[in-house]
Amino acid sequence: MRIFSPRFISIVGLALALMIVIFIAQLFTNRATLALTKGNLQAVETFRINNRMQELVNIAFDLQTKLRNSAIVLNEERSKAIADSLNYLGYNSNALTQTNTQAKTKTYLHNLNGYIDRQIMLSFRILDFAKRKDESGQRMLADSLRILQLGDSIYTNCLQVQKQLEIDLENTLVLNTKQANKLSYYNRLLALAAIIAIVLMATIIIRRHRKQLQLINDLEKAQKVAERSTEAKDQFLANMSHELRTPLNALLGFGQLLSQTKLDEQQTQYAEVITSSSNNLLNIVNDVLDISKIEAGKLRIDNRVFELSKLMQDIEMMFSASIREKGLFYHC
């Protein structure tokens, strides 16, 4: 005995396959979303770093231009402005090293921070010599600053960082494109699986519905045939009962007439057997009609008193000839 039909198993398998494809598509959707978010954040961080490096390069060149001139006169206000610029330069340089970048980019940023620290250190020493009116020390450090060309080194290092940031961003975009292509592939696969599942389920449902309609139609036809058969049977029983009642009534009538004539004891017994058998046969005919009433739900049962001994005597008289013929004995 089969618990599940192959059609049911195929529907369950199709539903499970569709669920697996949906799960995989959702997984790739989440990955693509995370990658896209990461790429957007990386792009924003790249623009922020580029803007900050551009500002650092401008400040570094400006400070280098101002401080490498050994003849420059630094009053208190101008020294304070340069010191503020140096502090701003150092703060932003340290902030760049804390950004979330790739390892190679972070190495370039640390190198950049080293160049900026050297420029800041020399610049503060120049300010210190200028504050103490030590022209020889100021001239020596200004020459060192001019020879080292730290501004050019900072600019070159910023270009390396910028190029590496572009490479990292491009790699991220390529990876995001691959993720998007995978997502698009699984979405197409999901759409195709959904279409196939819908078509198959619709086909199965339509075929099953057609079979149900055909079964209902066959049942209606069978019911009509059964009703016609029942009607024919009822009509046959009714006709048969009426056809049988006519000769039975004749037998009963002639049996009663025969019993009213002068008969000896044995003939009287035979006449009684004829009358009893005719009554029994009439009862059988009536029972056949009762079967039709039972099937139609119209039979009514009456509660009447009867004598069991009289019934047994009638049975003995009805089968007396067969009992004698077979050598049997009947006692009640």
Image: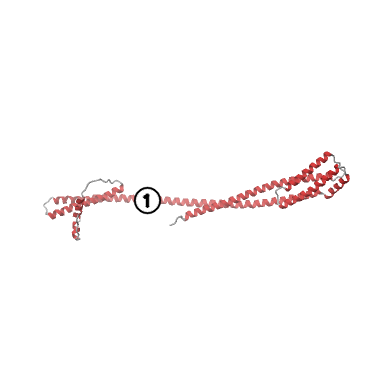
* Residue topped by disc 1: 221
Q: Is residue 101 left or right of residue 17?
A: right
Residue 85 percent across, percent down from the top left: 79, 42
Task: Report the colour scheme.
Answer: secondary structure
Q: Nearer the viewer, residue 35 or 181?
A: 35
Mark 1 burial class by Cα count in 10 Å: few <14, some 14-19, many 20+: few
- How many numbered markers are drawn? 1
Q: Quadrant of the C terminus?
A: bottom left
Left/right of residue 259 with respect to residue 287 in the rendered view:
left
In this view, the residue in front, 304 or 287, is 304
The structure residue drawn at horizontal position 79% and vertical position 48%, both measured from the top left corner, is 117
Quadrant assignment for the N terminus: bottom left
Q: In terms of secondary structure, where does tag 1 sit? A: helix
Percent position of residue 322, x then y:
20, 58
Q: Is residue 118 left or right of residue 15?
A: right
Q: Is residue 177 left or right of residue 263?
A: right
